[in-house]
Amino acid sequence: VPAPFREGRGDGRRAVRHAGGMDPADGASAAFSPPFADHLRHPRNAGTLAPASVTHRGACDDPACGDRLTLDLHVEDGVVRESRFRVEGCVGAIACGSALTTLLAGRAALPDAVTAGEIEAALGGVPSAKRHALRLAIATWRAALAGPVHRT
């Protein structure tokens, strides 16, 4: 299970940072399903929400592979209205973070509102070597729900 993100690593990073393995810019992404490759080449909802809009924030590290995923949520009346993700990781983490945010819109802010199976289906399948990214996406979603942002 991915570990919670450790704060203090700096915020000056791009929203999506490829950390090795197959480069999304080369022809290697042809080995993925068309939806997976599309999320990889054109990540949806990458970045951060405006600070005043963030109601929940969560982040997780996957110590086995070094991937890091952060999720900002704007939840209103128990429903996810908007989400953004930031990732430093492999192509699987990029695609899974992107697919997660597309699935969250309009969903109830409940831990089981989105499943790894739904993310995998949205991506048209996930290669076995990248399945760890499904677990990271779900762990980050649950961490975000457990981490409401309190303003004073």
Image (cartoon, rainbow, N blue to C red):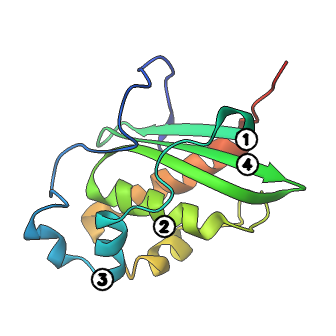
Q: Residue at x 41, y 20 (%)?
A: 9
Q: Which residue is mark 3?
A: 34
- Structural crowding at the residue carrying mark 2, measured as other residues with C-alpha within 10 Å and reported as few (<14), some (14–19) or many (≥20): many
Tag 2: amino acid: Ala
- Mark 2 against mark 4, which lies toward the viewer? 4
Q: Could you tell me how far apart the alpha carbons at marks 1 and 3 are, in whole angstroms?
A: 33 Å
Element carrying mark 2: helix
- Structural crowding at the residue carrying mark 1, measured as other residues with C-alpha within 10 Å and reported as few (<14), some (14–19) or many (≥20): some
- Mark 1 against mark 3, which lies toward the viewer? 1
Q: Could you tell me how far apart the alpha carbons at marks 1 and 2 are, in whole angstroms?
A: 21 Å
Which badge, 1 or 4, is on the more N-terminal residue? 1
Residue 74, which numbered label? 4
Q: Is residue 61 above or below residue 79?
A: above
Is the residue under label 4 in contact with that under label 1 (CB below 8 Å)? yes
Q: Residue at x 18, y 70 (%)?
A: 29
- Structural crowding at the residue carrying mark 3, measured as other residues with C-alpha within 10 Å and reported as few (<14), some (14–19) or many (≥20): some
Residue 55, position as x, y percentages in the image:
76, 40
State left or right for residue 119 relative to residue 95. right
Residue 99, which numbered label? 2
Q: Which residue is mark 1?
A: 53
Element carrying mark 1: helix
Q: Could you tell me how far apart the alpha carbons at marks 2 and 4 are, in whole angstroms?
A: 17 Å
Element carrying mark 4: strand
Q: Could you tell me how far apart the alpha carbons at marks 3 and 4 are, in whole angstroms?
A: 29 Å
